[in-house]
Amino acid sequence: MGNDWQASREWVDISTKWRLVPTGLRSSRPEDPFAQGWLRMEDGDLEQAQRLFEEACRIRGDGNDYVALGDVHVAHRDWAAAESQFRRALVVAPLSILAVLGLSLVRAATGHADTAVAELDVLARTRKGDPVIGYYLAVALLARTVEVRTETGDGRLLIGDVKQLEQCEDLSRRVALSGTDDAELLAAARSLLAETQSGREWIWTAPRNAAFLGGVAALFGVVPIILGGLLGSWPLVLAGLVIGAAAIFYAVYTYRRQRWQLRALSR
């Protein structure tokens, strides 16, 4: 299971933050339950990893022990249990960045991505350009784009109004500036940004109808203006202006939409 496991998004979510820890931490004491637990975790043996990390918590109770145990729960997507362990880690080690990043992942997964973004923004300012912090900030930003969009009955995400469009555009741009080096997250942000940009394009929903109204505007708008000018009749000119403007307004109001509106209407 090791190769498949280490290629999974869950493993990336878990392991990225441990890049902040010295490489030799997990191998300096191979007999330690924490080190053994990591070997099992790397192999994808979550049951044994959990048992060993629980033993490490009982024997030593270091902040990293609780973070690692919380990571096992993250792998199982047991967010309540994961949050509990990350909070324990902060009690033992109040300055644990690993625990803070673990909590941000929980918040991003449980509908509180806005809180995660706010907290990670602060952390990112103190560690500018750090790709590890940037990774979790990017995860939280993308999770926020999920929260602000409208979910259809079949599980699709759509931009349902102008506010959602603007939020998604801003959040996707921020992912690109987050500092992450994760290609999948950056690609997701580029795809969403492209969707928001194409969503601003104006589309004629019924070109034939619009063209017909354009003809009406020309016939009953422009012609009276010309005749009124030739005959010196200002009422005729005014009538042409009113009729032409009304026809054009009705055509635009009825048959011209931004692309995001058409997508929303198709849900």
Image (spheres, helix red, strand yellow):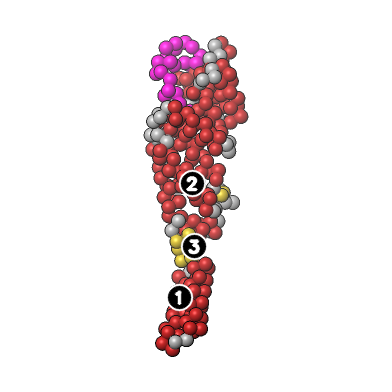
The mark that comes first in sequence, 3 or 1, is 1
Name the spot of residue 46 as percent of width and height, x first: 52, 25
Name the spot of residue 118 as percent of width and height, x first: 52, 34
Q: Is mark 1 on a helix, strand or loop?
A: helix
The mark that comes first in sequence, 1 or 2, is 2
Q: Is the magenta stretch mostly helix, strand or loop?
A: helix
Number of residue marks: 3
> CB atoms at circles 3 and 1 under 8 Å apart?
no
In the foreground, 142 or 27: 142
Name the spot of residue 19 as percent of width and height, x first: 42, 24
In the foreground, 264 or 257: 257
Task: Tell me if residue 228 comes above or below residue 140 in the rendering.
Answer: below
Which residue corresponds to mark 3? 257
Q: Does the magenta stretch include residue 245?
A: no
Neighbor class of circle 1 (other Cα within 10 Å; few <14, some 14-19, many 20+) is some
Kind of residue sitting beneath label 2: Cys
Residue 219 visible in the snapshot: no
The mark that comes first in sequence, 3 or 2, is 2
Kind of residue sitting beneath label 1: Gly
Which residue corresponds to the image point at 49% horizontal and 12% vertical from the top-left? 32
Which residue corresponds to the image point at 51% horizontal and 43% vertical from the top-left? 145
Q: What residue range appears in magenta?
A: 11-36
Q: Give the numbered dot on residue 214.
A: 1
Q: What element carries label 3?
A: strand
